[in-house]
Image (cartoon, helix red, strand yellow):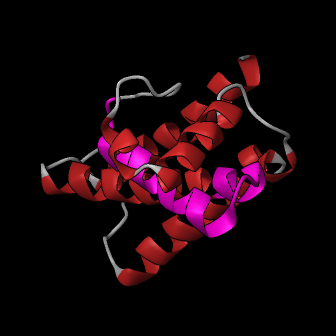
Amino acid sequence: MKTDGQIFPLVPSLRLWLGYTAIACLLAWFCFGDLRHHLLETHDADNFRDNARISQDWPFFFSLEKEQASGRLLYEFVSLLAFLTWGADPGWYHLLVVSWHVGVSLLLVRCCTAIGYNIELSMLTGLLFLVNVAHFRGIH
């Protein structure tokens, strides 16, 4: 009989991480599967116009006059790289965003375990982070 209160204690291992990754990818596919087929989102056209202008005038990247000046330079740089790679196709851009969310979910699990949370709570935290965006987009 267990005394620590855990019904199904998990032991961190490569197999567990691969299983979690598979579950996260499956959950992302379930929650965001049709995202690639969405037409332009609220701000996609603005981003594409900004990126087209940046590709012609590189210093505009740092301008506050952009239509979508977020202040998050890493995000804006990744958006620019995606634009330079795929052009103004929102499908590939949306898939990139979903894959980043899956990756950040994995990183969140790793960070939670590194600061001392048990693996079960860490994985639940990562999955809740992943699906939280689905509810936001579904409502808006």
**Which residue does the image show at 33% across and 49% down from the upper left?**
74
Indicate left or right for 121 with 37 as reference.
left
105 vs 39, nearest the viewer: 39
Image quadrant in which the N terminus is located: bottom left
Residue 111 location (% of width, % of height) = 22, 53
- Res 61 visible: yes
Q: Does the stretch in magenta take in 92?
A: yes
Q: Nearer the viewer, residue 124 or 70?
A: 70
Count of number-bearing discs: 0
In this view, 131 is above or below 92: above
Q: Residue furthest top?
A: 140
Q: Is residue 9 inside the magenta stretch?
A: no
Camera-side residue: 93 or 84?
84
- In the rendered structure, the answer to whether residue 50 lies left or right of residue 57 reads right
The stretch of residues the image draws in magenta is 71-95
Principal secondary structure, stretch drawn in magenta? helix
Q: Residue at x 54, y 44 (%)?
A: 53
Residue 6 in sight: no
| Residue 71 position in % (x across, y down) | 32, 30
Relative image position of residue 7 (x, y in whole percent): 42, 51
User: Residue drawn 49% across and 61% down?
Assistant: 81
